[in-house]
Image (cartoon, rainbow, N blue to C red):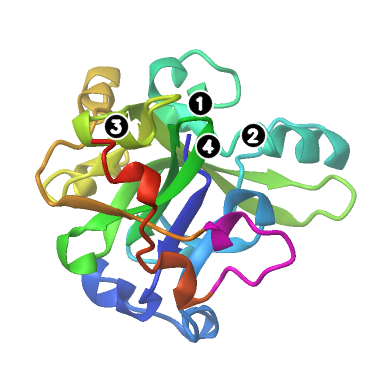
Amino acid sequence: MCYNISLLNPSELGIRYDIQLSSEDSLFNLHPIYHRNAFDLMKYPIITNQDSKEINYSTWGLVPNWIKNINNAKKIQNKTMNARCETLFEKPSFKSAIKKRRCIIPVDGFFEWRYYDGKNYPYYIYLTGHKIFSIAGIWDVWKNPDTEIENCSFSLITCPANNMMEKIHNKKKRMPVILSRDIENNWIKRFLSKNEIERMLKPYNLDDLQAHTISRLITQRNKQKNNSDVIKQFDYVPLKNFQ
């Protein structure tokens, strides 16, 4: 599964996605996101199929619009950070969103762990040139019945790992659905058939996906992880002979 991402140059989203950034966007674009964990429940920029020319700041962890109260909303949010592509059209939390409310989650990297000899080793995965790329997601808007405040939230879609990610994420063998640039705009079209959607939910197999091991800063409690140290390469001796 995927619960950790980065976006080092959010000010480039306007150019990357041909979007006119607003004054609200500037408040979020002051600092790079070296590391964001899903369970931080902080706002993150996404692009929805409702308005593909705007940034929507949403909470990671989809809350379906039919949830009745805040307690149930909090419970379900912790279970919907990721959505498996195999069950999107079956699960009650996701089956409406995948048909009607798809989104792009812009990132320039994500983090996963490799298991070897009883220990887990963290990796940082990105595209050549550290370019911004698109992860497939779904979104929804839930209104708190007590406050009438609406909250937009999203889930990140995962699929079976490609050959590279099978070696890294070798316990669960999953990866996020990365949308290549030639299909990302199709993903956020308003109306798509089930077959059209499913054809895009596949492992990313272009050869520009790269990875390196990083330090254990990312797993240390009470440490500030949103800084450049979290993505720096760190070599582990036990992994030198583990290909």
If you read the primary sequence from the N terminus, does the residue marked by circle 2 or circle 4 appear first? 2
Q: Classify 164 as above or below 50.
A: above
Q: Give the label, 1 or 4, closer to the camera.
A: 4
Q: CA distance from mark 2 to mark 4?
A: 37 Å
**In the shown orientation, is residue 235 left or right of residue 15?**
right
Q: CA distance from mark 1 to mark 4?
A: 39 Å
Location of mark 4 (residue): 119
The residue range painted magenta reads 216-226
Q: Residue at x 23, y 66 (%)?
A: 130
Tell me where residue 147 appears, x and y as whole percent. 86, 55
Q: Give the label, 1 or 3, closer to the camera.
A: 3
If you read the primary sequence from the N terminus, does the residue marked by circle 4 or circle 3 appear first? 4
Residue 225 colored magenta? Answer: yes
Front-most of 66 and 17?
Answer: 17
Q: Quadrant of residue 17?
A: bottom left
Residue type pointed to by label 2: Pro
* Disc 3 residue crowd, few under 14, some 14–19, many 20+, Cα 10 Å: some
State the mark number for residue 167.
3
- Tags 1 and 4 touching, CB below 8 Å: no
Q: Residue at x 55, y 72 (%)?
A: 226
**In the shown orientation, is residue 85 left or right of residue 241?**
right
Residue type pointed to by label 3: Lys
Residue type pointed to by label 1: Ser
Q: Residue at x 64, y 34 (%)?
A: 64
Q: How many marks?
A: 4
Residue type pointed to by label 4: Lys
Q: Give the label, 2 or 3, closer to the camera.
A: 3
